[in-house]
Image (cartoon, rainbow, N blue to C red):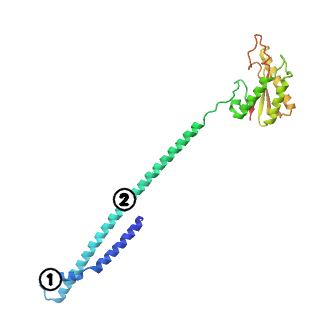
Amino acid sequence: MNLRSQIILLLLLLIALISWCVYTYDYDLSLNKNSATIETIDTKPEENIQNIEENISEDIHSSKNDIINSTLANIEANTTTNIIDNEQSLTDNENINTEENLDINNISDEIQINEISTNEIIEPLITINEKYIRENNEQRIENLSQETQKLQIKILDILKKNPIIFKSQSNVTTKSSNISINKIVDILNEYKNIKVEVAGHTDASGPEALNEQISLKRAVNIQNTLIRSGINENRIISRGYGESIPLVKNSRDGYSRKNRRVEFNIIQE
């Protein structure tokens, strides 16, 4: 029962109590009490009757005031108790809500900590030499997806078994190089979203500037071969790195058959 209902109920009880007191008051007792004084007063009937009525009215009024004051005191005490109880209930509810909010915050913090711990840094499957050039939207292989990195590893395995190599100071490939070129064409046809860099390399047998030119011609030669095989030219870019990124150590005179090569590096996915 709320506070408003309790107050209304107490007021109704007060009215009922007052009515009961009025109707059950023993007027005969009051009259007998005052009859003793009638004998001692003057023999003037009218004045005696008036005095008796005044005494009776005063007694009734006094009794009513006592009852009303007592009832009002009880109502005030009950009302104060209810207000205190309600305030205490509100305080308890606030404390409960605060504790629930703290629990929710703790749970959120635990979830965030768990998320951070699960988002661990994944090491790349493969990396590339820092000397390889990347421009515009091109990316290094270690920054691409795991699936693309696996595809790059597959390309490296193909070139390891059948490297695309050239005769000294030439951009003409050997016959065995065609095996790898055809496999690269198949991969590009299967994965139409990737873009590759054709990287040309030389050994250190000639002047550095000349080797850079030769390496670029080798890359362009392979690029044209891929285009003739049906690969979109926008998916291929060619660069010459000369002798700057050797695959193996050159001989004393700077010669190395393995360093005269072309590589395919995925630069977009």
Q: Residue furthest top?
A: 252
Q: Residues within 10 Å of mark 2 (few under 14, many from 20)?
A: few
Q: Earlier in the sequence, mark 2 or mark 1?
A: 1
Q: Residues within 10 Å of mark 1 (few under 14, many from 20)?
A: few
To which quarter of the image does residue 48 belong?
bottom left
- Number of on-image labels: 2
Q: Is residue 4 above or below residue 130?
A: below
* Amino acid type of the residue tagged 2 in the rendering: Ile
Q: Looking at the image, which is closer to me, 229 or 66? A: 229
To which quarter of the image does residue 113 belong?
top right
Work out whether residue 136 can be spotted: no
To which quarter of the image does residue 210 belong?
top right
Q: Residue at x 49, y 47 (%)?
A: 103
Q: Position of residue 146 (x, y in %)?
A: 69, 34
Instruction: Indicate the quadrant containing the N terminus: top left, top right, bottom left or bottom right.
Output: bottom left
Q: Which mark is residue 146?
A: none
Q: In the image, 244: left or right of 233?
A: left
Q: Position of residue 227 (x, y in %)?
A: 85, 31
- The residue at which mark 2 appears reads as 84
Q: In the image, 82: left or right of 26?
A: right
Q: Position of residue 33 (x, y in %)?
A: 18, 81
- The residue at which mark 1 appears reads as 36
Q: Residue at x 81, y 30 (%)?
A: 184
Q: Position of residue 36 (x, y in %)?
A: 14, 83
